[in-house]
Amino acid sequence: MLAERPTHGHELWVELTRRQVWKWAAISRPQVYYSLKKLEAAGGIRRARDRDPALGPERTVLEPTASGRRMLTDALARPEWATQRPPSPFLTWMVLSWQARPDDFVAQVERRRQFLLTHLAEDRVALEAIIDETWQNSDAAMIVRLGIQQFEAELKWLNKVQARQRPG
C-alpha cells in the first residue's frame, strides 16, 4: 500500500481495515507496525514530512525507497508464493477425528459448517463492497471470490463427510 501512496502508519492500518484485508491475508495491527519498523531498518521505507499543515508539524508519513521497491519486486518473484499449501487446522482435526467421540465429531463438523456459512455471508458482503470500490474483476474481487468458492466447495464436502457411515 505504501507503493500506492506515502502513508502514516495509523492511516495504513485504517486503510487495511477498510479494505477488509483479513479476508485474504493473515495480518494483524502489531504485524503491520513490526513490518514497518523492519522495512525502515532495512532501508525499504523512509520517513518523509507530511506537507499538510492541518495534521501538525511533527506528522510524518512513510514512503518506499528505490531499494524498497526493488525489495518488493524481488520478493514477489520468489517461487514459494505459488508453491505452498496453507495448512488448515480443521483438516488436521479431520485426520485425527477417528479418535474423537461420535457426539464430538458431529459437533465439530456442525461448528465448521456454521463457521463456513458465517464467513460466506461476510465474504459476499465484502465482495460487493470491493466491486463497488474497484471493479468486477479487480485482483481483490477475484481473491475474495476464490475464497467464497473454496468455502462453497468445503460445504459440499462436509455434506459427504456427514452422510458417510463412520465405524464406532
Image (tube, rainbow, N blue to C red):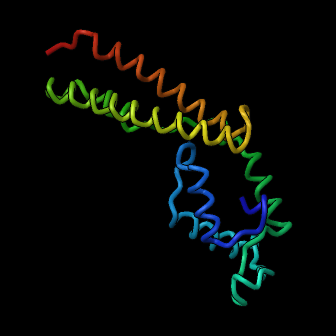
* Residue 27 on image: x %, y %: 53, 55
Left or right of 150 on screen, residue 57:
right
* Number of numbered discs visible in the structure rendering: 0
* Residue 123 on image: x %, y %: 51, 37
Q: Is residue 25 above or below residue 146?
A: below
Q: Decide which of 52, 168 is in the foreground and name it.
A: 52
Residue at 36% across / 20% down in the picture?
158
Residue at 63% across / 71% down in the picture?
9
* Residue 100 on image: x %, y %: 18, 29
Left or right of 24 on screen, residue 156:
left
Residue 141 occupies quadrant? top right
Residue farthest to the bottom, as pictured? 57
On-image quarter of the N terminus: bottom right
Residue at 23% across / 9% down in the picture?
165
On-image quarter of the C terminus: top left
* Residue 103 on image: x %, y %: 14, 26
Residue 56 occupies quadrant? bottom right
Residue farthest to the right, as pictured? 66
Residue at 60% across / 36% down in the picture?
128
